[in-house]
Image: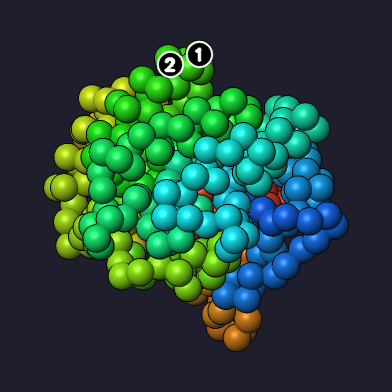
Amino acid sequence: MRRLRREDWSRRLTAENTLTVNDLIWPVFVIEGTRKTEPVKSMPGVDRLSIDLLVDAVREARDLGIPAIALFPVVEPALKTPDARESANPDNLVCRAVRAVKESVPDIGIFCDVALDPFNSDGHDGIVRNGEILNDETLEALCQQAVNQARAGCDVNAPSDMMDGRIRAIRTALDDAGYQHVQLCSYAAKYASAFYGPFRDALGTGGVLKGDKKTYQMNPANSLEAIHEVMMDVMEDVDSVMVKPGMPYLDVIRQVKDAFGRPTFAYQVSGEYAMMKAAVQNGWLDNDKVILESLMAFKRAGTDGILTYTAVEAARLLRQMGGHF
Ligand code: PBG
């Protein structure tokens, strides 16, 4: 076996997978204000950005060749209500961010989350009544949110709420409103995971969350159920699907890709990022090598694209390496 590994040219020639900038989707946290950045303590190297600085950062990402970003708004506590109505406000933070980016950097794709948690005073992705997360009432709110984001100019609505039937409902609402071209990327197999902790710090949704998300997000024990989830979304006419978290669920990515062959994305979530960066800060891991190896693992598992907080760093590294790893 070692003959093939002896020289660099031969290792390159026999590589089964490659990582390029075209595999990267960059998630960004947006805040109110101007010229404002706020570091996320539990995610070293990640800052929340006001819209003006976001536009600058996205321009740099576009210049590096990153195909798409995913926007997550940090909503002021006073705007959070039990019906999450701020999610349907055409002038809410995420809509203003989408319009600003589209105006200055029109050629990068914009993903927007569809879920109520940033806007919900209960911190849940759905509407809560008597402690219960209501499915069908939530669907109506999600449809309004998705249409609102489409009107602002988002290219991909990415429902991350894990309600049943949301892909069909949102597709119909988008089509009826004239947004047939807006894609749907479902967080199809999204697990009830402890790896989302730093994300909830970043958005300030962790402090308000009542209880957990186990009645809608998946049980980490299951993978056949992930196939069922993806099958439902494919039947409901989804364009692409996502598995989340990423590194602890590479087996699920592979099963989903093999079963459906659809565009399959994975989210290297906040806790995965935090683990790597904490070890790097301690001098225990090599930053550049561990980032690239972790992203390559996603490619080997069958992903078409990776949502990763390392996207800009990784794109710079890939450029230094001649475009691919
Ligand atoms: C909310 C949402 C979450 C993430 C993306 N969208 C958190 C959650 O479900 O509580 C997690 C992303 C990350 O941890 O990086 N619907």
Q: Which residue is mark 1?
A: 178
Q: Tell me if the residue at label 2 has its CB under 8 Å from ligand 1.
A: no
Q: Marks 1/2: CA distance?
A: 5 Å
**Is 141 located above or below residue 272 in the figure?**
above
Residues under numbered marks 1 and 2 in contact, where contact means CB atoms less than 8 Å apart: yes
Amino acid under label 1? Gly
Asked if residue 83 can be seen in this view, the reply is yes
Q: Amino acid at mark 2?
A: Asp
Does residue 181 sit above or below 186 in this rendering? above
Q: Position of residue 36 (x, y in %)?
A: 80, 61
Disc 2 designates what residue? 175
Ligand 1 location (quadrant): bottom left
Residue 251's x, y, as percent?
27, 53
Residue plotted at (50% across, 13% down): 178
Q: State which quadrant residue 187 falls in.
A: top left
Q: Position of residue 209 (x, y in %)?
A: 40, 67
In front: 52, or 242?
52
